[in-house]
Amino acid sequence: MTLYPWQQSIWQSLVRRHQTSGLPHALMFGGPEGTGKHPLCLFTATWLLCKNPADGPCGQCHSCQLMAAGTHPDFMLCQPEEDSRQIRIDTIRRLNHFIYSTPQISQCQVVILRPLEVMNLSAANALLKTLEEPPGESFLLLEAERPGSVLPTIRSRCQTISLPLPSHDDAMRWLLEQGVAAEDAEVALKRNANEPLTAYDWITSELSGQQNHWLEQLQQWMQGSLPLQVIADPWSKQFADVLAWWYDLSCDLMRAASGAPPELCRHGHLATDLLHGVAADTAKLITFLDKLQHLNAELMSGAAHHNKTLTIEVLLLEWRRMFTAPVGASLS
Ligand SMILES: [Zn+2]
């Protein structure tokens, strides 16, 4: 278990703080997932539980071995269960029960709760009680992608550690060390907001190929050469990924429509190419962006979405209406 190079300075300040004044019982790690927030939380948990901690977990003791095996009795990971996108009150009740009991082998207990944004209100209220009366020797490590969207009553009872994005050079260096070609690394970082882990996943998973395929389908749809249903059915099965990608693409269109050069667009020349010859209606584009942003926020907060195919169909129709002068074949 190691830290990423760009986490070193945050880690050193965390260690210094623990050694001088002690860490607070509730720490909120805020920032993008693709910078390694969860691995950092696990590293912190392992270190807090370690029998011989120095400026990191020793990696050798019984506690460190149990953490590596995922079976430490004084550690609890709380996240949405597989069939749910939300953290419910039952989970927080289990957390409370765990954190107020006596540690079994370590000197404290540690809970990681993630992501904080998907707690429903009753779960948040149950957690609030624990934050108000923290148990003696326990630590709550809370992960939030967007700390600003966490309930203020919760946020004010935690100390926030903001995880910044690494510099472009640091992110590039790390990707090259993983064996990624420089050209691919550049594109991947640009498409994924300079988050090195997301960029790496994007290259090594099927997502980059998938996104190119979605784009081809979208262009065929704009040209009227692909029926609505053929696109909407498969897209509805990858609803969250499609909406996140579509939002990024639409933001790029907005940038291009405002005159931004291709190097400032995540998709490079693509956005300007899409606009070229197909005058997008900017007012409609803003409405479209609003709608996608709202849907993405709903999904991130853990809400279930029931009419996925219908939603995709409506969005596809609205998308085509934004382009007043279609390329290629005429619109039907
Ligand atoms: Zn250890």
Image (cartoon, helix red, strand yellow):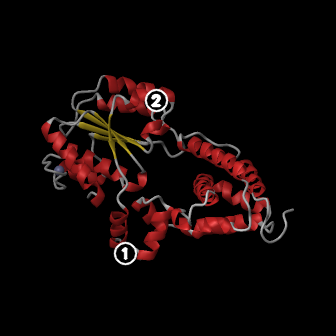
Check residue 123 in the rendering and tell me which mark sits there, or answer none: 2
Residue 135, by quadrant, is top left
Give neighbour class at mark 2: few <14, some 14-19, many 20+ (Cα, 10 Å). Answer: some
Residue 113 vertical position relative to residue 133 in the rendered view, above or below: below
Q: Is residue 275 visible?
A: yes
Q: Amino acid at mark 1?
A: Gly
Q: Amino acid at mark 2?
A: Ala
Q: CA distance from mark 2 to mark 1?
A: 43 Å
**Left or right: 235, with 26 as reference point:** right
Give whichever of 251, 104 is nearer the camera: 251
Judged from this view, the residue extending furthest toward the front is 259
C-beta proximity under 8 Å, tags 2 and 1: no
Q: Is mark 2 within 8 Å of ligand 1?
A: no
Residue 109, by quadrant, is top left
Label 1 sits on residue: 179
Question: In which quadrant is the C terminus drawn?
Answer: bottom right
